[in-house]
Image (spheres, rainbow, N blue to C red):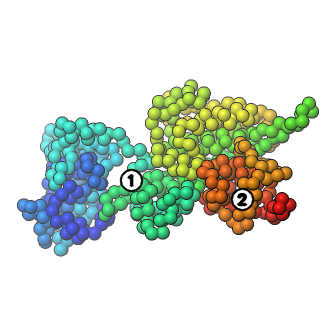
């Protein structure tokens, strides 16, 4: 339980000259009142961020700390820590404060930092040392710890709705674990007005503005969703936060397989995984028919369905379960596996027809950030989009599976039967992207909007900057309808072609594009 105190002890004692909502002084080790106050701080009834208990610091009748403090004898320190651990086990649900051994004016103190708990309400026996122990709820009211009764108890129990994991503060991390660079790049990409102020804000201030840090001023903490998106290595805090792609050249029963692992900030790793599959495993088949001039074009797996399947898995997986999102690709199907399964409020029969709408969201904040990056709509539309994409491509319908305990969720995209006979997955593709789009302009003649785009892309420029003259607001539609046809025609190129969805991606005109502008001048 030993840990370094997050703030200066002298500041803690001298700035808070009297006991208050968030600090209590105890001249000696008295388990019963101390455990009641720990329970009250854990319940954090007023949402103040919990509080501190200083053991060994006496105070006068007005609640002011007395200096020098009374202190604790050396020989008592180990015993107090053992007993504290024993008595904290009586708090329900389990709750343990951070303990720090400190000295003030030559005297030993034990400082307990008790942040608001994530699983409130908490209860503890009124007398933890008694033979008969009946748990009670306790809250902090001004400088006193009182038992929650009547309306206070009903309100406290009303806080039972557990804070979702992605919106909880992370007690094992610090605000400095959030990357201001990643936060600024995110704000630039989504076109936030806050982006203009980032240079003048500290990491903490920026994180608070983006609601990825919370807590009292003396001890701010990052929120889990902030560490997922704005830390270079989220796996430091959430083991196995990754996307694994496994390809079976000889089929799922074969001896050979190839693996690729995607880690890093959640938005970036999601985009990179989708781009990797798009480049290496999505194949277009063109079938010519003698009885009609139009060729039949189809994909082994439509990109829109693959993209939605992966993003849904990233959105709805649990980041407390140490299992990756796994994508298995073979000549028969593409399977996305994540843990756990869908909420029990969703029936598989509804999913199969695109009507499965959850009443509860596992990762609402993760969904908010994915929506900002235009990777999801966040309105339970993902399954419907998968169904539509498969139908438009002429593919068999997707298949969904889970078990009775909802311990996993499996989504299978069968390969298009004609594509299976015409193309081999895993060979260099060399074909156009299969994203469904309404193309603006053609190879033979560009639209005015595309002419304008090539004019301003003489030097590398971001997608957001390219959009400004057109007045468009949807990056996805602009990319699909205006930019993608120019890329396909070789008139425009990416600065990072191996990572089409990189947040650092920029675009520039090619020599062919310059020649086309001269021809149309």
For the residue pair 520 and 24, the one nearer the viewer reads as 520
Which percent across, then down, holds residue 107?
17, 70
For the residue pair 396 and 70, the one nearer the viewer reads as 396
Which percent across, then down, holds residue 237?
46, 55
Query: Residue at horizontal 66%, vertical 47%?
Result: 477
Say which element carries label 2: helix
Query: Residue at horizontal 73%, vertical 35%?
Result: 393
Q: Which mark is residue 453?
A: 2
| Mark 1, residue position | 169
Inspect this view and state whether residue 138 appears.
Answer: yes
Look at the picture and state if 102 lies above or below 437: below
**Relative to 169, is 90 on the left or the right?**
left
Look at the picture and state if 168 lies above or below 218: above
Inspect this view and state whether residue 258 appears.
Answer: no
Say which element carries label 1: loop
Image quarter hosting the N terminus: bottom left
Instruction: Mark 2 vs mark 1: give the one in front.
Output: 2
**Relative to 221, is 310 on the left or the right?**
right
Quarter holding residue 410: top right
């Amino acid at each position: 339980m030993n840990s370094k105190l997050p703030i200066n002890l002298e500041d803690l004692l001298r700035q808070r000259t009297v006991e208050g909502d968030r600090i209590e002084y105890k001249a000696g080790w008295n388990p019963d009142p101390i455990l009641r106050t720990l329970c009250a701080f854990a319940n954090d009834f007023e949402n103040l961020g919990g509080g501190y208990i200083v053991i060994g610091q006496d105070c006068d009748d007005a609640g002011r700390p007395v200096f020098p403090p009374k202190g604790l004898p050396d020989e008592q320190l180990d015993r107090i820590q053992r007993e504290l651990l024993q008595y904290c086990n009586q708090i329900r649900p389990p709750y343990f404060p951070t303990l720090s051994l400190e000295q003030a004016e030559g005297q030993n103190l034990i400082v307990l930092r008790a942040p608001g708990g994530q699983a409130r309400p908490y209860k503890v026996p009124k007398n933890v040392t008694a033979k008969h122990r009946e748990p009670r709820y306790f809250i902090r009211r001004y400088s006193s710890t009182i038992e929650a009764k009547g309306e206070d108890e009903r309100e406290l129990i009303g806080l039972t709705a557990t804070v979702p994991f992605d919106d909880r503060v992370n007690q094992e991390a610090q605000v400095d674990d959030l990357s201001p660079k990643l936060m600024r790049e995110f704000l630039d990409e989504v076109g936030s007005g806050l982006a203009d102020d980032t240079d003048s804000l500290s990491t903490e201030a920026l994180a608070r503005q983006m609601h990825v840090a919370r807590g009292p001023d003396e001890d701010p903490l990052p929120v889990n969703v902030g560490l997922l998106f704005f830390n270079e290595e989220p796996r430091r805090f959430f083991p196995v936060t990754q996307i694994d792609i496994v390809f079976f050249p000889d089929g799922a029963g074969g001896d050979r397989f190839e693996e690729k692992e995607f880690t890093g900030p959640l938005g970036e790793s999601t985009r990179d995984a989708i781009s990797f599959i798009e480049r290496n495993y999505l194949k277009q088949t063109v079938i010519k028919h003698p009885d009609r001039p139009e060729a039949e074009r189809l994909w082994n797996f439509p990109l829109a369905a693959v993209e939605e399947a992966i993003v849904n898995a990233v959105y709805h997986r649990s980041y407390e379960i140490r299992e990756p999102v796994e994508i298995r690709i073979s000549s028969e199907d593409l399977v996305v596996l994540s843990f756990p399964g869908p909420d029990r409020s969703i029936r598989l029969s509804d999913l199969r027809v695109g009507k499965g709408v959850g009443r509860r969201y596992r990762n609402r904040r993760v969904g908010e950030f994915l929506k900002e990056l235009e990777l999801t709509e966040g309105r339970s539309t993902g399954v419907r989009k998968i169904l539509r994409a498969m139908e438009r491509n002429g593919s068999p319908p997707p298949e969904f599976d889970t078990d009775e305990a909802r311990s996993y969720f499996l989504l299978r995209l069968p390969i298009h039967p004609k594509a299976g006979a015409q193309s081999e997955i895993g060979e260099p593709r060399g074909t156009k992207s299969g994203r469904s789009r309404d193309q603006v302009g053609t190879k033979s003649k560009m639209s005015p909007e595309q002419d304008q785009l090539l004019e301003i892309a003489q030097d590398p420029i971001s997608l957001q900057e390219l959009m400004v003259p057109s007045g468009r607001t949807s990056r996805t539609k602009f990319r699909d309808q205006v930019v993608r046809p120019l890329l396909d025609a070789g008139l425009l190129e990416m600065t990072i072609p191996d990572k089409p969805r990189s947040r650092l991606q920029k675009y520039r005109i090619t020599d062919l594009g310059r020649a086309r502008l001269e021809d149309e001048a």
